[in-house]
Protein backbone atom coordinates (compact mmCIF):
# COMPACT_ATOMS: atom_id res chain seq x y z
CA UNK A 1 0.00 0.00 0.00
CA UNK A 2 1.09 3.58 -0.69
CA UNK A 3 2.96 5.05 2.28
CA UNK A 4 2.26 8.73 2.93
CA UNK A 5 4.70 10.68 5.11
CA UNK A 6 2.59 13.39 6.67
CA UNK A 7 2.60 16.45 8.88
CA UNK A 8 -0.37 18.80 9.41
CA UNK A 9 1.45 21.65 7.58
CA UNK A 10 0.26 23.14 4.24
CA UNK A 11 2.29 21.06 1.77
CA UNK A 12 1.47 17.62 3.20
CA UNK A 13 -2.18 18.70 3.68
CA UNK A 14 -2.49 19.02 -0.14
CA UNK A 15 -1.47 15.41 -0.69
CA UNK A 16 -3.84 14.28 2.06
CA UNK A 17 -6.66 16.08 0.24
CA UNK A 18 -5.84 14.31 -3.05
CA UNK A 19 -5.82 10.92 -1.31
CA UNK A 20 -9.09 11.59 0.49
CA UNK A 21 -10.77 13.00 -2.65
CA UNK A 22 -9.82 9.99 -4.76
CA UNK A 23 -10.18 7.25 -2.13
CA UNK A 24 -6.77 5.81 -3.01
CA UNK A 25 -5.80 3.50 -0.09
CA UNK A 26 -2.79 4.71 1.89
CA UNK A 27 -0.90 4.18 5.12
CA UNK A 28 -0.29 7.45 6.91
CA UNK A 29 3.09 7.83 8.60
CA UNK A 30 3.42 10.96 10.76
CA UNK A 31 6.71 12.87 10.51
CA UNK A 32 6.99 15.38 13.36
CA UNK A 33 8.96 18.25 11.81
CA UNK A 34 8.90 20.21 15.10
CA UNK A 35 10.87 17.31 16.65
CA UNK A 36 13.28 17.09 13.72
CA UNK A 37 12.06 13.71 12.39
CA UNK A 38 12.51 15.02 8.82
CA UNK A 39 16.29 14.74 9.37
CA UNK A 40 16.36 11.06 10.39
CA UNK A 41 18.45 8.98 7.94
CA UNK A 42 15.54 6.64 7.10
CA UNK A 43 13.41 9.61 6.10
CA UNK A 44 16.21 11.33 4.14
CA UNK A 45 16.40 8.14 2.06
CA UNK A 46 12.81 8.86 0.99
CA UNK A 47 13.01 12.65 0.82
CA UNK A 48 16.59 13.93 0.41
CA UNK A 49 15.22 17.47 0.87
CA UNK A 50 14.25 16.65 4.50
CA UNK A 51 10.77 18.18 4.26
CA UNK A 52 7.22 16.85 4.27
CA UNK A 53 5.38 15.43 2.35
CA UNK A 54 6.80 12.35 0.63
CA UNK A 55 5.28 9.10 -0.58
CA UNK A 56 6.53 5.59 -1.31
CA UNK A 57 4.50 3.71 -3.86
CA UNK A 58 5.53 0.12 -4.44
CA UNK A 59 9.23 0.95 -4.17
CA UNK A 60 8.93 4.30 -5.96
CA UNK A 61 9.67 7.37 -3.83
CA UNK A 62 8.26 10.78 -4.70
CA UNK A 63 8.95 14.00 -2.80
CA UNK A 64 7.70 17.59 -3.12
CA UNK A 65 3.95 18.13 -2.82
CA UNK A 66 3.38 19.20 -6.42
CA UNK A 67 5.50 16.39 -7.85
CA UNK A 68 3.43 13.99 -5.75
CA UNK A 69 0.18 15.49 -7.04
CA UNK A 70 1.35 15.16 -10.65
CA UNK A 71 2.57 11.60 -10.00
CA UNK A 72 -0.74 10.60 -8.42
CA UNK A 73 -2.68 12.24 -11.24
CA UNK A 74 -0.70 10.18 -13.78
CA UNK A 75 -1.10 7.04 -11.69
CA UNK A 76 -4.86 7.33 -11.14
CA UNK A 77 -6.00 9.46 -14.08
CA UNK A 78 -8.00 11.45 -11.53
CA UNK A 79 -8.25 15.21 -10.86
CA UNK A 80 -6.37 16.19 -14.01
CA UNK A 81 -9.14 17.97 -15.87
CA UNK A 82 -9.44 17.55 -19.65
CA UNK A 83 -6.72 17.18 -22.32
CA UNK A 84 -7.75 20.63 -23.64
CA UNK A 85 -6.97 22.12 -20.23
CA UNK A 86 -3.58 20.41 -19.86
CA UNK A 87 -1.51 23.53 -20.67
CA UNK A 88 -3.53 25.54 -18.15
CA UNK A 89 -3.15 22.79 -15.55
CA UNK A 90 0.64 22.75 -15.95
CA UNK A 91 0.86 26.55 -15.87
CA UNK A 92 -1.25 26.93 -12.74
CA UNK A 93 0.29 24.05 -10.81
CA UNK A 94 3.68 25.75 -11.33
CA UNK A 95 2.20 29.11 -10.33
CA UNK A 96 1.07 27.55 -7.05
CA UNK A 97 4.24 25.49 -6.53
CA UNK A 98 6.76 28.23 -7.29
CA UNK A 99 4.73 31.27 -6.23
CA UNK A 100 1.94 30.76 -3.71
CA UNK A 101 3.93 28.13 -1.76
CA UNK A 102 7.36 29.75 -1.36
CA UNK A 103 6.07 33.32 -0.90
CA UNK A 104 3.54 32.17 1.69
CA UNK A 105 6.20 30.14 3.49
CA UNK A 106 8.63 33.07 3.59
CA UNK A 107 5.87 35.48 4.68
CA UNK A 108 5.06 33.16 7.61
CA UNK A 109 8.74 32.84 8.42
CA UNK A 110 9.57 36.55 8.49
CA UNK A 111 6.29 37.61 10.12
CA UNK A 112 6.01 34.91 12.78
CA UNK A 113 9.26 32.95 13.19
CA UNK A 114 12.35 35.02 12.38
CA UNK A 115 14.43 36.03 15.42
CA UNK A 116 14.69 39.60 14.02
CA UNK A 117 11.78 41.68 12.71
CA UNK A 118 12.99 42.67 9.25
CA UNK A 119 10.48 45.14 7.80
CA UNK A 120 11.90 44.89 4.27
CA UNK A 121 11.57 41.08 4.16
CA UNK A 122 8.11 41.12 5.73
CA UNK A 123 6.92 43.74 3.26
CA UNK A 124 8.46 41.93 0.26
CA UNK A 125 6.86 38.57 1.01
CA UNK A 126 3.48 39.89 2.16
CA UNK A 127 3.24 41.97 -1.03
CA UNK A 128 4.07 38.94 -3.17
CA UNK A 129 1.44 36.85 -1.38
CA UNK A 130 -1.12 39.62 -1.98
CA UNK A 131 -0.12 39.91 -5.64
CA UNK A 132 -0.47 36.14 -6.14
CA UNK A 133 -3.86 36.21 -4.39
CA UNK A 134 -4.92 38.99 -6.77
CA UNK A 135 -3.90 36.90 -9.81
CA UNK A 136 -5.91 33.94 -8.49
CA UNK A 137 -8.84 36.19 -7.65
CA UNK A 138 -8.97 37.38 -11.25
CA UNK A 139 -8.67 33.83 -12.60
CA UNK A 140 -11.60 32.76 -10.41
CA UNK A 141 -13.94 35.51 -11.63
CA UNK A 142 -17.08 33.66 -12.74
CA UNK A 143 -15.47 30.23 -12.18
CA UNK A 144 -15.74 27.53 -9.51
CA UNK A 145 -12.31 25.97 -10.11
CA UNK A 146 -8.92 27.39 -11.03
CA UNK A 147 -8.62 25.27 -14.19
CA UNK A 148 -11.58 24.10 -16.30
CA UNK A 149 -14.96 23.17 -14.88
CA UNK A 150 -13.98 20.47 -12.40
CA UNK A 151 -11.83 20.04 -9.30
CA UNK A 152 -8.18 19.45 -10.25
CA UNK A 153 -4.83 19.08 -8.52
CA UNK A 154 -4.42 22.86 -8.92
CA UNK A 155 -7.33 23.54 -6.55
CA UNK A 156 -5.96 20.89 -4.20
CA UNK A 157 -2.49 22.39 -4.24
CA UNK A 158 -3.69 25.97 -3.76
CA UNK A 159 -6.01 24.98 -0.88
CA UNK A 160 -3.05 23.89 1.28
CA UNK A 161 -1.54 27.37 1.56
CA UNK A 162 -4.66 29.54 1.01
CA UNK A 163 -5.97 27.98 4.24
CA UNK A 164 -3.27 30.03 6.00
CA UNK A 165 -4.45 33.40 4.62
CA UNK A 166 -5.45 34.83 8.02
CA UNK A 167 -2.21 33.69 9.64
CA UNK A 168 -0.28 35.41 6.84
CA UNK A 169 -2.33 38.55 6.24
CA UNK A 170 -4.11 39.06 9.56
CA UNK A 171 -7.83 39.11 10.33
CA UNK A 172 -8.80 40.55 6.94
CA UNK A 173 -7.48 37.34 5.38
CA UNK A 174 -9.22 36.66 2.08
CA UNK A 175 -11.79 39.48 2.42
CA UNK A 176 -10.12 41.69 -0.24
CA UNK A 177 -10.28 38.76 -2.72
CA UNK A 178 -13.99 37.84 -3.05
CA UNK A 179 -13.61 35.25 -5.82
CA UNK A 180 -10.73 33.54 -4.06
CA UNK A 181 -12.66 33.61 -0.78
CA UNK A 182 -15.75 32.03 -2.40
CA UNK A 183 -13.57 29.37 -4.05
CA UNK A 184 -11.69 28.62 -0.80
CA UNK A 185 -14.88 28.26 1.24
CA UNK A 186 -16.28 25.81 -1.32
CA UNK A 187 -13.13 23.64 -1.43
CA UNK A 188 -12.72 23.79 2.34
CA UNK A 189 -16.32 22.60 2.89
CA UNK A 190 -15.84 19.45 0.78
CA UNK A 191 -16.20 16.25 2.85
CA UNK A 192 -12.65 15.24 1.92
CA UNK A 193 -11.23 18.54 3.21
CA UNK A 194 -13.16 18.15 6.46
CA UNK A 195 -11.76 14.61 6.83
CA UNK A 196 -8.22 15.83 6.19
CA UNK A 197 -8.49 18.47 8.92
CA UNK A 198 -9.81 15.79 11.31
CA UNK A 199 -6.93 13.46 10.44
CA UNK A 200 -4.38 16.22 11.15
CA UNK A 201 -6.13 17.22 14.39
CA UNK A 202 -6.14 13.67 15.69
CA UNK A 203 -2.38 13.25 15.43
CA UNK A 204 -0.47 14.65 18.38
CA UNK A 205 2.16 16.67 16.57
CA UNK A 206 4.41 18.83 18.70
CA UNK A 207 3.27 22.47 18.67
CA UNK A 208 5.79 24.11 21.01
CA UNK A 209 8.53 26.00 19.18
CA UNK A 210 11.56 25.40 21.40
CA UNK A 211 15.26 25.03 20.68
CA UNK A 212 14.78 21.49 19.30
CA UNK A 213 12.26 22.88 16.78
CA UNK A 214 14.36 25.90 15.89
CA UNK A 215 17.43 23.75 15.30
CA UNK A 216 15.41 21.33 13.12
CA UNK A 217 13.61 23.93 11.02
CA UNK A 218 15.90 26.97 11.04
CA UNK A 219 19.40 25.47 11.18
CA UNK A 220 20.87 28.62 9.59
CA UNK A 221 20.52 30.31 12.98
CA UNK A 222 22.95 27.79 14.53
CA UNK A 223 25.77 27.91 11.99
CA UNK A 224 28.81 29.37 13.73
CA UNK A 225 31.59 29.35 11.13
N1 LIG B 1 8.58 22.35 -2.02
C1 LIG B 1 8.26 21.45 -0.95
C2 LIG B 1 8.27 22.20 0.36
C3 LIG B 1 8.06 21.26 1.52
C4 LIG B 1 8.04 21.99 2.85
O1 LIG B 1 8.58 23.09 3.01
N2 LIG B 1 7.42 21.31 3.84
C5 LIG B 1 7.36 21.84 5.18
C6 LIG B 1 5.95 21.64 5.73
S1 LIG B 1 4.80 22.65 4.83
C7 LIG B 1 8.34 21.07 6.04
O2 LIG B 1 8.33 19.85 6.06
N3 LIG B 1 9.21 21.78 6.78
C8 LIG B 1 10.20 21.19 7.62
C9 LIG B 1 11.50 21.94 7.63
O3 LIG B 1 11.57 23.02 6.98
O4 LIG B 1 12.43 21.48 8.26
C10 LIG B 1 6.88 20.82 -1.19
O5 LIG B 1 6.04 21.47 -1.85
O6 LIG B 1 6.67 19.68 -0.76
Image (spheres, rainbow, N blue to C red):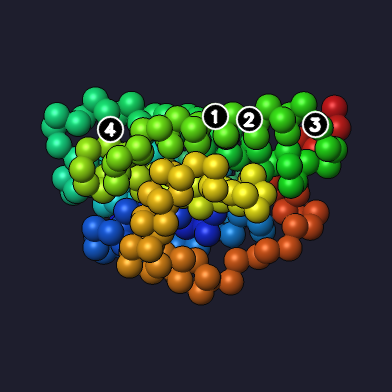
**Who comes first in sequence, dot 4 or dot 1?**
4
Residue 90, placed above or below residue 109:
above
The answer to whether residue 127 is left or right of residue 120 is: left
Circle 2: element type: helix
Q: Position of residue 184 (x, y in %)?
A: 42, 51
Q: Nearer the viewer, mark 3 or mark 1?
A: 1
Q: Are marks 3 and 1 in contact (CB under 8 Å)?
A: no
Kindly identify which residue carries mark 4: 89
Tell me the distance, in whole angstroms, between the alpha carbons under discs 4 and 3.
Answer: 35 Å
Q: Quadrant of the N terminus?
A: bottom left
The residue drawn where x is 13% and y is 32% is 83
Quadrant of the rendered structure where residue 145 is? top left
The residue drawn where x is 55% and y is 42% is 176
Residue 45 visible to the viewer:
no
Kindly identify which residue carries mark 1: 131
User: Hey, which residue is sitting farthest bottom in the picture?
Assistant: 202
Kindly identify which residue carries mark 2: 127
Task: Residue 119: give its label.
Answer: 3
Q: Nearer the viewer, residue 112 or 72?
A: 112
Amino acid sequence: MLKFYFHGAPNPMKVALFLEETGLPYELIPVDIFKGEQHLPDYIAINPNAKTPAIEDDGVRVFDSNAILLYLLEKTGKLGGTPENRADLLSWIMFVGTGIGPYSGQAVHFKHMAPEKLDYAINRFLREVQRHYQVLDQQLEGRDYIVGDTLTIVDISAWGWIAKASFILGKDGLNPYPNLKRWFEAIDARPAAIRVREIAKNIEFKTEVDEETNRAMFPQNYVTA
